[in-house]
Image (tube, grey):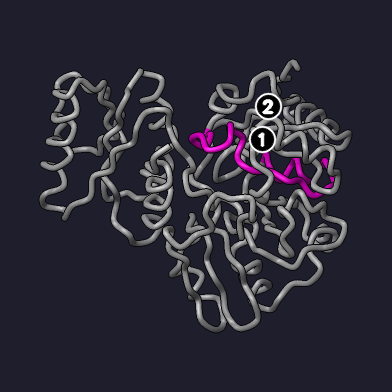
Amino acid sequence: MKTLRLSVDPADPDTDASRRAVAQAAEILRRGGTVAFPTETVYGLGANALDPHAVAGIFAAKERPGWDPIIVHIGDIALLNRVAGSVPANARLLMDAFWPGPLTLLLPKHPGVPETVTAGRERVGVRMPAHTVALALLRAAGVPVAAPSANRFGRTSPTTAEHVAEDLDGRIDAILDGGPTTHGVESTVTDARDDGCTIFRPGVITLEQIRSVVRGEVRQIAADAEQRESGEGAVAPGLGIRHYAPRARLVLVESDRTALRTVVAATARGLEQAGESVGLMLPGGFPRGADHAHVFAWGNWDDLEGLARRLFAGLRWLDAQGATAIVCPVPPEQGIGAALRDRLRKAARPR
């Protein structure tokens, strides 16, 4: 399969060239093909969510197991009626507060949604992305679009079109290049019911933000309590026990703020002395420790949004440098730090 490369200017998606690219990508989706496209979180691999043959193309391209459900993206609230059987009151409140945006809601599935989209579950994940290119594509296609991250299953999520091509060139119909993504980590996944809300995957929309909107109790499922990889099916998208992983072994370093810089340097030095080709996800002001380490300048340690935006790009870059072990400090828990910690812990799981 030859993968078509299409480009859109995200700053001005209304140019004639951009509109032609979007129209071409939308036509591919309507006829049952697969298109990778940017969202504000990461690049997604899209197909018509109501066409089981099209959805099968996603699983084949990604080598994704059938137990892992897929989020459905919509560009118009009217399409929600073709995806969800009902919408609880708390889900409406969250839509009003955060849609379009990086929030996925688990809702009762409409009978027209194929079982493969939900891995046989009765609830379907739905979101409306806040990205000009994604919304233009979804509205032009006029159908709900199933779209997990546009990478081989378990690999580091893509935040640029080049990342998509590294994993999926020749395996999908088209890549719609809309530049780098904004947030760099996937959407928050929530199950909002009338009496409260459960967060299954932390993301850009934080626990604190959701608590400020939802009526009733809001709880967040700990990573270690998530559905394990099995044929039973995951409760929600993105809950695989090992996910988001670079090819290199990921070594996480946790310590109090005072000691963290010293511990990161000592860990890198020890791995280099043991014969590893060391990669470093290195925040500003942290010593490198290992003289010959490949260093990715991660950014300001106090800018959690910036760290999230550059996380997957950094892991992919260090892989490309030939690192065999990547040392990465673990950010604090607050705000989007919860999403960073979730992705890092899954990426570091043993193979």
Q: Are marks 2 and 1 in contact (CB under 8 Å)?
A: yes
Q: Give coordinates of residue 55: x percent, y percent.
A: 78, 41
Q: Give coordinates of residue 39: x percent, y percent.
A: 61, 42
The residue where tag 2 is placed is 175
Q: From the viewer's perspective, is 143 left or right of 67?
A: right
Q: Residue at x 18, y 31 (%)?
A: 268
Q: Residue at x 57, y 45 (%)?
A: 40
The quadrant where residue 351 appears: top left
Q: Residue at x 49, y 43 (%)?
A: 243
Please tell me how many numbered marks the rendered image carries. 2
The kind of secondary structure element at disc 2 is strand
- Between the residue at mark 2 and the residue at mark 1, the CA separation in whole angstroms equals 6 Å
Point out the image quarter for the N terminus: top right
Q: Residue at x 41, y 52 (%)?
A: 342
Q: From the viewer's perspective, is 30 left or right of 43?
A: right
The residue where tag 1 is placed is 37
Disc 2 marks a residue whose amino acid type is Ile
Residue found farthest to the top: 2
Relative height, residue 30 to residue 93 (above, below): above
Comparing 8 with 224, the one in front is 224
Q: Which residues are magenta?
A: 133-159
Q: Which mark is residue 320?
A: none
The kind of secondary structure element at disc 1 is strand
Comparing 21 with 345, the one in front is 345
Q: From the viewer's perspective, is 282 left or right of 35?
A: left
In magenta segment, residue 138: yes
